[in-house]
Amino acid sequence: MKRTSFRRAVVPGVAALALSLAACGGGDAGASDSEGGETAVSGSVAVDGSSTVYPMSVAAQELLNEQNPEVQVTVGEAGTGGGFEVFCTGETDISDASRPIEEDEAAVCEENGVEYTELQVATDALTVVVHPDLAVDCLTVDELIALWGPKSKATNWQDINPEFPDQEIKLFGPGTDSGTYDYMAADVIGDESETTRKDYEASEDDNVLVEGVAGTEGATGYFGYTYYEQNSDKLKAVAIDSGNGCVEPSAETAQSGEYTPLARPLFIYVSNKSYTDNPAVKEYVDFYIENLAEIAEVGQFIPLSDELYAETQAALEGLQG
Amino acid sequence: MSIAATTAREVTAQLATGKSKDRTVGSLVFLCALWFSLFFGVMVLVALIASTAIKGAPRFDAELLTNYTSIVRPETAGFRAGILGSLWLMLFTAIMAVPLGIAAAVYLEEFADPNKPWNRLIEVNLQNLAAVPSIVYGLLAVAVMALLGFDDAGIVLGGALALALLILPVIIITTREAVRAVPREIRDGSLALGATVWQTTWRQTLPSAVPGIATGTILGLSRAIGEAAPLVVVGLAGSVLFDPEGMMSKVTALPMQIYSLTSQSREELREAASAAIIVLLVMILGLNALAIYIRNKFQRSW
């Protein structure tokens, strides 16, 4: 109770101060915001959601705090679904997501009167990896479904394709709570059940997957491109053929959309109300988008192409409205 | 030492040195089994601590304690927010759980009629509560916070509430045992000299039970300081870059930061997490040492 009254007393004051400063700065919105922020803006920002986007939101938090320690940001990693759950009841200001919001989640938001803006912040690529000695270099999407689909019974690589070596398949993948799993199950495999096969070694910890695939002959697994990049000496990435020939996973192919369907956008969802009412949220989001390339690099994601970045900036300007 | 224990020790020594007369196969097998159990238990612990300490060794520096966590500069990541957060949580956990726990225990031990069915129901429930998984207390705390009208439970008060609920049964049970161990003669003497029941409890029974109560409380707190599960449920954030400032301040805890960093991909962050595990162990050992010290200093024999 104390907190609410404290907020009521302080927030309008801070908001008025911020407004007056913004008015002084005027003109070029992007530049003046960060300058005004150094002296004026304070308050708290609650961020929760995808553990994939977590490093980016933490990087934004850190870099912002170097300039302005008065903006108190907390970042959690409840998962994309868990994040939307608290976001749509108004408990958090920003929700990190490794997939677009789903209809039933959006319905909860609407019910609670939480309006939001979706901002793409980076591109992530799923990478299918195999043990380095395995003679499999390229998989078609159909082969990927044969390997990971919910009805798959394949136990030997030759079950997938007779040209593949005669070796037992060992599968490693993220657990069912992770956004990476959702992405693979719903968007890549696209089965109605939105599941993958269940007889694989599951771990939420990508390091366990890396060690598992690197240490087991005939093993395959999938996780984010950044994990592959850091462990490329231990693992072999498989190129993906979605009908236009084999495409190796890389920053360029993920951004251009060639590396489909295994490249995915990462988002932050900003509550419109928090953005307009809480200057700290505005400060954080503006900083986040302004320094997106640097933050994506720190978070080890593929930064947005110029075109996509322009789209994100346009969406943010719509919010500033 | 009991007679059984002394005898067992002598027999073991004789078996080991070959002086015993009943050196049968069975007794030797039993001896080996005992040694194996001991060896296994101790070795697993030593191996775990040693491997964690070796992994975290490059990060045993002042920055580990004074810096905030960092993804931008993972080699200087620290646990300042987590360490301070854990201390704040412990403070408010103790403020909430200790008076309630002691009061409940004194009521049950000194005032309640053990034959009344509701008192027996309370007793059975207390025993059961002590065995409830910690994550359930997190859910309970979220519900209580929502009832109290907080939109956000990820603050010092919410975390401390979950931890207080978690250790309350432990405090009640250990306090009851400590109060029960105070000899009846002390109460009788006090009452005979004309003191009221209240005066007797407040000035004689409770002071005599302090070592037991303090030990139980500190052991309860050292369990609470290592918990992450109920705090995750309550909604504490993994990444907080400011110091907690009070009961309503957003906070994180050391075990939560360890949990969050061990699942990051960068080696530096996992090294830092290993070093933080050692810091957490030192904090817990410190609490336990304090418990032993208090017990020895205030222990009385009758």
Image (cartoon, rainbow, N blue to C red):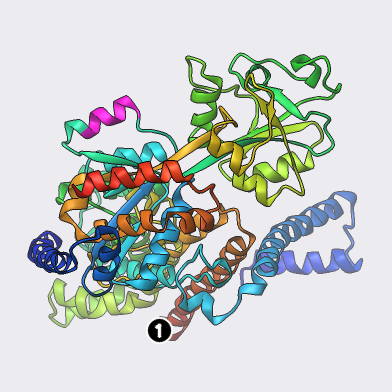
> 10 Å neighbourhood of mark 1: few (<14), some, or many (≥20)?
some
Marked residue chain, label 1 = B
**Which residue occupies the extreme bottom position in the image?**
B297
**Residue at the outermost front position:** A27
Residue B67 among those drawn in magenta = no
| Above/below status of B233 relative to B62 | above
Q: Count the marks: how many?
A: 1
- Image coordinates of residue A52 in percent, x first then y, are 49, 45
Range shown magenta: A102-109
Residue depicted at x 78% and y 56%:
B36
The three-letter amino acid code for the residue at tag 1 is Phe
Depth check: give the residue in front, A215 or B287: A215
Residue A13 position, x and y percent, is 9, 67
Quarter of the rendering containing residue A14? bottom left
Question: Residue A231, image x and y in percent?
Answer: 70, 49
Q: Relative to residue B222, is residue B7 drawn left or right? A: right
Q: Is residue A319 above or below residue B224?
A: above
SS at badge 1:
helix
By secondary structure, the bulk of the magenta-drawn segment is best described as helix
Q: Which residue is mark 1?
A: B298
Front residue of this view, candidates B19 and A109 = A109
Task: Identify the residue shown where x is 15% and y is 62%.
Answer: A3
The answer to whether residue B122 shows anywhere in this view is no
Percent x, y of residue B227:
44, 57
Is residue B243 left or right of A133 when viewed as pictured?
Answer: left
Q: Residue furthest right?
A: B18
B160 and A252: which is toward the camera: A252
Quadrant containing the N terminus of chain A is bottom left
